[in-house]
Image: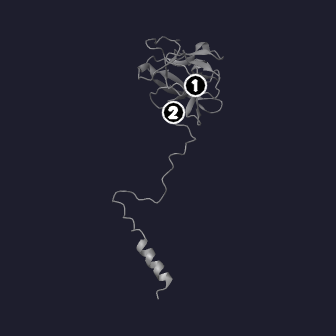
Amino acid sequence: MIPLVGILVTVLTVQSPPSAAPPPSGTPSSSAPAPDSATPSTSPPPLPAGLFRLTNVDSRMCLSPPPGNPVAAAGLIQSDCDGRPEQFWRLHREGTDETAAAVHSLRNEHTGLCLSVDGAHKENDVTVTHYLCGDDKGLFPDQFWSFRYDTARHGWKLVSRNSGKCVALPAGSGDGEQALQEDCDGGTWLLWRT
């Protein structure tokens, strides 16, 4: 009589899968688990180092001067992101604010003018413009901006150091809609991607 343990060992030996073949040469072998790509990042992406477009999270349109209107003090609008030269901006680091966050000026690559707020006003519903980048004393107060990242909605708030308010577009607005300075509440209409 064969002991039961001997039959069980024989069955397990016969039923066990063949050992895995070694990986082909040149292919790294690792027993570490693959990183979970579904885990969202809580850190903001880096700000662009070169040319970039500011795309509104809500409308998915780009911030730019009106087509054919490179005049200083022209109000900025949103338009389809079609690659026109006036849709491109460049960051210039200008220092830090009271919280040690980086402060930048944004210069339109096509016009050479800086992102500004009409008349350096500090209230809501004021037109966001592009204007001469300061004078012989430096940039104007409304030409300094901080980027604050919203990790939940993956967009940047573009905050004026002068007013503490954000560049925004009215919710649900379309092509040609004017950009305004508004309170930095939680709406996606004031979030931007670079």
Could you say which is closer to the camera, residue 25 or residue 48?
A: 25
Other residues around mark 1 within 10 Å, as few (<14) / some (14–19) / many (≥20)? many
| Disc 1: which residue | 189
Could you say which is closer to the camera, residue 31 or residue 132?
A: 31
First-in-chain label (1 vs 2): 2
Q: Is residue 23 left or right of residue 12?
A: left
Q: Count of labels shown?
A: 2
On the image, the x and y values in percent for residue 46 come to: 51, 36
On the image, the x and y values in percent for residue 85 come to: 41, 20
Q: What kind of element bears circle 1? A: helix
| Disc 2: which residue | 47
Q: How is the image coloured?
A: one colour
On the image, the x and y values in percent for residue 77 come to: 51, 17
Residue 168, picture quadrant:
top right
Q: What kind of element bears circle 2? A: loop
Spatial CA span between label 1 and label 2:
20 Å
Other residues around mark 2 within 10 Å, as few (<14) / some (14–19) / many (≥20)? few
Location of residue 14 with respect to 2 vertically, above or below: above
Given the image, on which type of amino acid does mark 1 rest? Trp
Given the image, on which type of amino acid does mark 2 rest? Leu
Could you say which is closer to the camera, residue 84 or residue 115?
A: 84
Tell me the residue at 46%/86% (across/down).
2
On the image, the x and y values in percent for residue 4 come to: 50, 82
